[in-house]
Amino acid sequence: MFIGHFAPAFVAAAVSPQRPRLGLMFVAAQLIDWGFFALAMLGVENMRIDPSASVMVPFDLYDMPYTHSLIGTALWAAALCGVVAIHQRNLKIAMLAGLVVLSHWVLDWLVHVPDLTLDGTPPKFGLGLWNMPWIAIPLEIALTLGAFAFYMRRTLGTVGQPAVLIATMLLLQAINWFAPHPESAGVFLYLQALLAFGILTGLATWVGKNRWFRKRGGLASSGM
């Protein structure tokens, strides 16, 4: 799952108690993968290209105990929650960000072949929807567009920035699904992934700064 991970970010930003913090929630949504690709560049976690890994994704994610175990994900969530609570001085925003981080493991569990763990050791979990594109593709699009629509309904502002964001998300997802896959894993692949996350986070920050919450009666507000 790629852009589907941002669905909880849209929802969390839409119910945040202050101005929509979409950039922060986008960081939370992919924090686990930010961590994985950074650790992969250091050789701490590992993956390899294997066309037989699944129908849709040729990534054999055989070694990722610190990011994609449930305990590891919970620790990343707790760390971000703590940082946000200290920086923002708002426990609700911090808890929302932490929940978005936790959602990553749950969404991965839906699509991954069994490569997720509870604590970094077997057994491994994953429903394997990547082997069923006719389910995985509509599911990811529906989650993303549904959450985006919810965010748009809850906020006011120009439509240009959100249109650029969602169009870029769909474009990158199409590339992820249909472009030729790399022949081997390595720093170039990891940097490509981090660049994609960075582009979407930058656009989400731009969108969040230009939208406000709806209030009863149709007026806009920067807080709720």
Image (cartoon, rainbow, N blue to C red):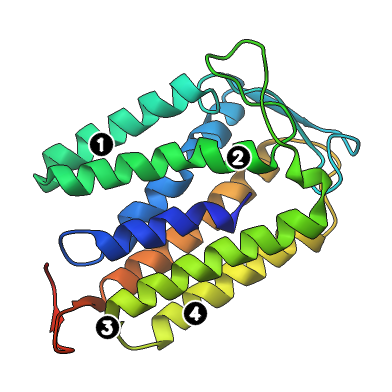
Q: What element carries label 3?
A: strand
- Contact check, label 4 and label 2, Cβ < 8 Å: no
The residue where tag 2 is placed is: 108
Q: Residue furthest right?
A: 52
Give the image quarter of residue 190.
top right
- Return the disc, 1 or 2, that comes first in the chain's sequence: 1
Residue type indicated by callout 1: Cys
Label 4 or label 2, whichever lies nearer to me, is: 2
The residue where tag 3 is placed is: 156
Q: Is mark 4 on a helix, strand or loop?
A: helix
- Contact check, label 2 and label 3, Cβ < 8 Å: no
Label 1 or label 2, whichever lies nearer to me, is: 2
Instruction: Look at the picture and state if 20 lies above or below 5.
Output: below
The residue where tag 1 is placed is: 81
- Return the disc, 4 or 1, that comes first in the chain's sequence: 1
Query: Residue at (35%, 79%) from the top-left corner?
Result: 153
Residue type indicated by callout 2: Asp
